[in-house]
Amino acid sequence: MEAAGGPVAGQLVPRPKLDARVRNLGGTLVVGWADRSVELDDVTALIWRAADGRHTIADIGKLVADEYDVGLAEAISDATSVLTQLHEMELIEFLDPRPAGQAGD
Amino acid sequence: MDDAITKEYGPYLTELSHRGLLPSTWLCSIFVAGSLVRGWGNDTSDLDVYVITAEPWAGTPSSLASVGVQPSVIPSYAVWMGKRRIDIQYWLDDQVDQLMKKVSWHNFDNSQNSTHLLTGPELDLLERIGYGQAFAGEGWLEKRRREVAQSAVFAFAAARNLNLTDFFVEDAIGQLQAGDVYSAVLSARSALGYAVDALMSSLGEIGTSEKWRARRMVSVKQEVLTFDEYWSLETMQAYDPTHPEEWVDAVLAMCQRICHEVSI
C-alpha cells in the first residue's frame, strides 16, 4: 500500500517492518536492514516510535504537532514525508486502515 | 557476613572444609550464590560455592568448565550433602582479573561482535558476584562487586541478547514466508526470550537461565513491558492454533518495541 498526500493517506497505519533491526545507542535510535543502517534524528525517532501499527499517520502528525508546537497540517505533512521516505527505504510498511469510527489511543 | 546466611549455609561450608574441598592457603574469597542465596530456591535447589584463590587448587576436580580466560578451564566439584547438591567452582584471582578486562568499556567500544565474548560460566560468575554472600574474603567480594557495577558487562549482555533476538526474528520471518509456521512459532518464542533478557540485562539482571526469567521480570523496575504483557506472551495466551501467524506477528512486533528501549 503506497502512502500518498491528502486525507486518505492520513488514515494509513504505518509500522516498522519486522525485520528492521533497532538499536538504542544511548538514546539515539539506529535502524539497520540488510547490510545498511541509518541513525534517526529526534523527529524521525518520534515518528518511528509512534508508528506502532495502531496509530494512523494523522495520529502521528498530531503527536508531532503537540511535541514541537507546530500546526497540525504541517505536522501531518512532515510525518507523511518521513514515513514515505522510510517506506521507500523498505523500513516501514502500511497496514490496512482501521475500520471507520475506531479512535486512536 | 549475614547471620542468617551463616546459619543457613555455614554447616555446608564446614563440611566441605572437613572433606578437604576448601583450600586454607592462597585464599582470596569463598562465597555462596545461586537461587538459594537470592531467595528464589527451594528444597531441590543446588548451592553454588565459589572459591577464589591466588594459586591453583590442588585437588582433583569432578569436571572442568570451559572459559575464555587463561587457564581456560575452571576445576569444578559436585558433592551431595543430604538432599542438597553443592557445586563448587575454583577460580584464580588472575582469571577474574582477565575477565574484568574483557568486560571493560574500552573493550565494549571496540568490539565488533559481543555475541560470543562471554562463556556461560563467566556470565554466571559476574552475575553472582553481584549478590553472592562471602564466607571468607568479604573485602575481595566487595571490591569485585564495585568493579562489576562499573564495567560494561551489562551492555555486553544486552548487546548479546539483542543480537540473538535479531537472529531469531529473522528466522521466524523466513520460516513464516516458507510456510513453516510451527518453526516460526518456536523462533518467535526464542526471540521474545532474548528480547526480555536484553531488557533485563540493560537494567542490571544478566542472568541467562530461562527458568528464572519471570523472577527477573519481577525484580527489575521498568516501564517498557508490564509483567502481565510479558506473561501473556510467554504463556502464549493469545495464541490461536487456527492463525498462528498472528501470534508470531504480535510477538515479533513486541520484540522490536523492546529493542527500541534497550539502551546500550
Image (spheres, coloured by chain):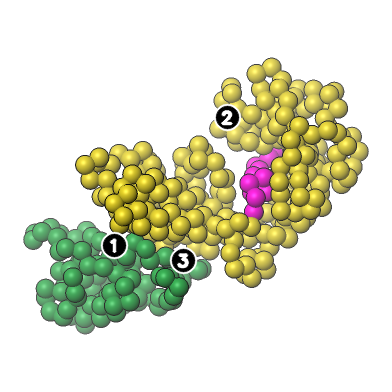
Horizontal relation, residue B172 to residue A13: left or right: right
What residue occupies the far top of the structure in this picture? B82
* Number of the label disc, if any, that sits on residue A52: 1
Which residue is painted at 91% across and 38% down in the image?
B25
- Amino acid marked by disc 2: Gly
* Number of the label disc, if any, that sits on residue A23: 3
**What quarter of the picture does the N terminus of chain B occupy?**
top right
Q: Position of residue A8 (x, y in %)?
A: 11, 73
* Number of the label disc, if any, that sits on residue B224: none
Which residue is painted at 16% across and 80% down in the image?
A5
Q: What SS does tag 1 mark?
A: loop
Name the image quarter holding residue A31. bottom left
Query: In which chain is the residue bearing label 2?
Result: B
Residue B198 shows in the view: yes
Write down which chain is painted yellow: B
- Amino acid marked by disc 3: Arg
* Number of the label disc, if any, that sits on residue B41: 2
Horizontal relation, residue A7 to residue B4: left or right: left
